[in-house]
């Protein structure tokens, strides 16, 4: 059965904390969602400010393959005719085939918030839908606070829907605006609506304040809803909205509904990454389906089981939605997981040989020292190269010296002097930096530039420090993770020491060595 997917990332999602879309950002999101094949993209409220109206004018001629752009607004104001209402006129001016308008369905919101009589509110709903429909618009009526309103005064909440239905609404959307209903309530109340309005498209719009938005949406579909609204990554006001990436995968892969074209399912992960990058947010690593660790395995028994029979610890094939299985390297990793991680780097490695045993033992020993290779695969590959006798250092350190200066001089607070040797040639380099690690990074790159010009294409993109044994205060051991990147790839390395500078140096050297090793290969 076909379901309609209605994405509100650009409207409801934009109400989330720290979310702000430029016009170009919005266009990128629209293009991503259209390629994925969602049915509706709610692009914003053209009445909210002149910039929004300009945005609608800009995208008016935008050619989309599948998606329909939806303009959002409210019913007419109290005491104003539809023809005079600025909000409704802006919806017409937006030039979209579909419009979504919200209206009150909770009796207390009618009497206490907008200070209208019950009948006046029903007239506001009906007249607004009828006016827009008469102008050729297909109207999606969002019954705001519907579930709470239904539980407070069932008859009035249903009358609000009836007003929109009789006026010609294309779709009746049931909104859990406060995000507090339970799945059994979502099912029972949606069932009552679908039975009352047979043949009408009923939509579900859930917020996630109780952590149940996805479950509520699925139960509403089970009860007969044929449109699901939400935001693709779940972000939005307060605790966010129903996460459409999760809803789509659950309903299409496990319940047989068609949410997006079947051939596009493999693009769900890539689409999530693209929208996250555009919104400048990080997808939680443990987010269902599209999180980086959604199919990550750490325990040796689990990894071994997945390699032998994938569904033993995976509920779907990750490749079905474009994600990948990942094995995390740690002291509890089994030999199978470690071998699977290394076989592409070292094809001649024998899974059952002595070398594998030495690698497993070294990994456990390093764990005791504070090393963690879950996020630092590059350092682990270099460690294995050393254990196998294949490692060739790109340079030898003679010494380095770090000088911190206060107050800062032109924004620089540290200097580094590094002396290295490459193939018998000694090189000394110095640099100022915004901190000791920055200065050390610049000095090392300067020293290596004459020997390895390809190092110019490598940049340090992230730097993290974690204190491992805080009870030792300033004498505590620290773990440093450095992420580096070139034009085509990124990698992370790790260093551990009681001295944060030394730990940073160890991670930095691994980063350079790994980059040069890849270049040679």
Image: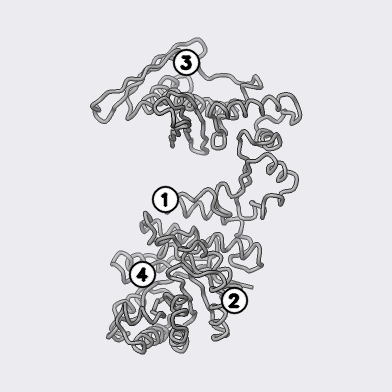
Residue at image x 45%, y 75%? Answer: 148
Which residue sits furthest front? 471
Tell me: 412 left or right of 424: left
Position of residue 296 measured from the top left corner of the image (x, y, whole percent): 61, 45
Q: Nearer the viewer, mark 2 or mark 4?
A: 2
**Secondary structure beneath label 2:** loop
The residue indicated by pointer 2 is: 223
Q: Label 4 to label 1, Cα distance in Å?
A: 22 Å
First in sequence: mark 2 or mark 3? 2
Is residue 494 visible to the viewer in this orientation of the structure?
yes
Tell me: 179 left or right of 520: left
Is residue 458 visible to the viewer in this orientation of the structure?
no
The residue indicated by pointer 3 is: 397
The residue indicated by pointer 1 is: 280
Q: Which mark is residue 45?
A: 4
Q: Which mark is residue 414?
A: none
Position of residue 323 measured from the top left corner of the image (x, y, whole percent): 60, 50
Position of residue 303 measured from the top left corner of the image (x, y, whole percent): 68, 42
**Secondary structure beneath label 3:** strand
Q: Label 1 to label 3, Cα distance in Å?
A: 39 Å
First in sequence: mark 4 or mark 1? 4
First in sequence: mark 1 or mark 3? 1
First in sequence: mark 2 or mark 4? 4
Q: Label 2 to label 4, Cα distance in Å?
A: 30 Å
Q: Nearer the viewer, mark 2 or mark 3?
A: 2
CB-based contact (under 8 Å), mark 1 and mark 3 = no
**Secondary structure beneath label 4:** loop
Q: Label 2 to label 3, Cα distance in Å?
A: 69 Å
Q: Which quarter of the figure has residue 250?
A: bottom right
């Amino acid at each position: 059965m076909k379901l309609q997917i209605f994405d509100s990332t650009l409207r409801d999602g934009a109400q989330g904390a720290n979310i702000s879309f430029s016009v170009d950002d919005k266009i990128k999101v629209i293009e991503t969602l259209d390629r994925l094949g969602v049915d509706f993209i709610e692009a914003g409220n053209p009445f909210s400010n002149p910039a929004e109206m300009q945005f609608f004018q800009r995208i008016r001629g935008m050619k989309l393959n599948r998606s329909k752009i939806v303009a959002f607004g409210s019913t007419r104001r109290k005491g104003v005719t539809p023809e005079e209402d600025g909000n409704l006129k802006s919806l017409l001016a937006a030039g979209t085939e579909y419009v979504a308008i919200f209206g009150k369905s909770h009796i207390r919101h009618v009497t206490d918030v907008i200070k209208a009589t019950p009948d006046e509110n029903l007239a506001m709903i009906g007249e607004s839908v009828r006016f827009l429909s008469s102008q050729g618009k297909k109207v999606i009526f969002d019954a705001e606070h519907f579930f709470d309103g239904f539980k407070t005064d069932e008859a009035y909440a249903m009358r609000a829907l009836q007003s929109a239905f009789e006026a010609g609404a294309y779709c009746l959307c049931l909104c859990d605006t406060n995000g507090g209903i339970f799945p059994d309530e979502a099912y029972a109340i949606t069932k009552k609506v679908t039975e009352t309005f047979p043949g009408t498209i009923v939509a579900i719009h859930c917020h996630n304040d109780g952590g149940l938005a996805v479950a509520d949406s699925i139960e509403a579909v089970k009860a007969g809803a044929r449109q699901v609204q939400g935001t693709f990554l779940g972000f939005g006001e307060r605790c966010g909205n129903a996460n459409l990436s999760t809803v789509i995968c659950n309903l299409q892969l496990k319940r047989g509904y068609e949410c997006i074209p079947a051939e596009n399912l493999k693009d769900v992960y890539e689409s999530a990454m693209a929208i996250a990058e555009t919104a400048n947010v990080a997808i939680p690593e443990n987010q269902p389906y599209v999180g980086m660790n959604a199919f990550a395995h750490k325990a040796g028994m689990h990894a071994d089981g997945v390699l032998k029979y994938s569904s033993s610890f995976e509920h779907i094939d990750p490749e079905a939605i474009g994600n990948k299985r990942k094995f995390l390297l740690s002291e509890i990793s089994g030999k199978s997981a470690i071998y699977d991680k290394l076989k592409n780097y070292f094809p001649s490695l024998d899974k059952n040989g002595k070398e594998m045993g030495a690698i497993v033992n070294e990994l456990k020993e390093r764990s005791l020292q504070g090393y963690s290779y879950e996020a630092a695969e590059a350092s682990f590959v270099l460690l294995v190269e050393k254990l196998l006798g294949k490692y060739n250092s790109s340079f030898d350190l003679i010494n380095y010296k770090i000088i911190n200066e206060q107050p800062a001089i032109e924004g620089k607070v540290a200097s580094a002097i590094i002396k290295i040797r490459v193939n018998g040639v000694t090189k000394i380099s110095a640099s100022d930096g915004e901190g000791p690690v920055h200065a050390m990074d610049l000095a090392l790159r300067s020293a290596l530039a004459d020997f390895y010009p390809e190092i110019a294409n490598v940049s340090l993109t992230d730097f993290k420090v974690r204190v491992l044994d805080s009870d030792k205060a300033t004498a505590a051991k620290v773990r440093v993770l450095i992420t580096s990147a070139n034009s085509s790839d990124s990698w992370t390395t790790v260093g551990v020491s009681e001295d944060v500078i030394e730990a940073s140096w160890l991670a930095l050297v691994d980063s350079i060595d790994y980059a040069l090793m890849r270049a040679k290969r």
